[in-house]
Amino acid sequence: MTEVEATLRAALTRAAGPSSDFDLNPGIRPRPDKPLRPAAVLVPVWLRPEGAGLILTKRSSHLKHHPGQIALPGGKVDPTDAGPEAAALREAREEIGLDPARVSVLGTLPVHETVTGFAVTPFVGLIDGPFTATPEAGEVEEVFTVPLSHVLEPARFLIEGRLWMGVRRRYYAVPYGPYYIWGATARILRGLAERVST
């Protein structure tokens, strides 16, 4: 077992609090009469000779929802999926060309509630050996890798804000070079960073 795998496995056994887009915005809450839709993402940690990296995507700028945003591979759980883990692996195959057989799922992070009405289950998975991403045409503009060490350091995360539906909303961000990683993706990664550093 590599040091990275041992660190992640230990982190995933530690207790963690809830995760949501509302953590920094107690005055903004989801509608209680509108149930959250199940979704899942993969937190793909790639074990490379130059050091472990986190694989992320940049969504196409012409998409209706979240255009141009940095995201983890994933999406809603379809009725044909065996469950959230199957959905995360299916979406990773569709979005970045990652064969599910290449992924060793280590565990989950707390379900993350989004302001857009989803309950997202994040699955942390390891990829070992060579991997060439194949971005999904029309949906994924770019697939890139961030050093895992960058997103496992809680001090790198900022709290920023912007107007959303007429209300000032605060959110986490963890920029890396030209990539502005923010919102649900940054909050999920910050939760992982907190557990690793505990």
Image (cartoon, rainbow, N blue to C red):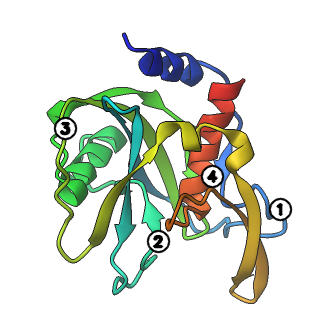
Report, in whole angstroms, how far the alpha carbon at label 1 lies from the one at label 4.
Answer: 15 Å
Q: Position of residue 59 (x, y in %)?
A: 36, 71
Q: Secondary structure at mark 4?
A: helix
In this view, 107 is above or below 123:
above
Residue 69 has which mark?
2
Report crowding for label 3: few under 14, some 14 to 19, many 20 or more residues within 10 A (C-alpha). Answer: some
- Callout 1, which amino acid? Pro
Report crowding for label 4: few under 14, some 14 to 19, many 20 or more residues within 10 A (C-alpha). Answer: many
Quadrant of image for the C terminus: top right
Report, in whole angstroms, how far the alpha carbon at label 4 lies from the one at label 3.
Answer: 25 Å
In this view, 70 is above or below 121:
below
Q: Position of residue 84 (x, y in %)?
A: 36, 43
The residue pinned by badge 1 equals: 26
Q: Residue furthest right?
A: 27
The residue pinned by badge 3 equals: 100
Q: Secondary structure at mark 2?
A: loop
Report, in whole angstroms, how far the alpha carbon at label 2 lies from the one at label 1.
Answer: 24 Å
Q: First in sequence: mark 4 or mark 3?
A: 3
- Callout 2, which amino acid? Gln
Report, in whole angstroms, how far the alpha carbon at label 3 lies from the one at label 2.
Answer: 24 Å
The residue pinned by badge 4 equals: 187
Pick the residue in front: 54 or 97.
Answer: 54
Q: First in sequence: mark 3 or mark 1?
A: 1
Q: Residue at x 61, y 68 (%)?
A: 115
Q: Quadrant of residue 2?
A: top left
Q: First in sequence: mark 3 or mark 2?
A: 2
Q: First in sequence: mark 1 or mark 4?
A: 1
Q: Residue at x 71, y 36 (%)?
A: 17
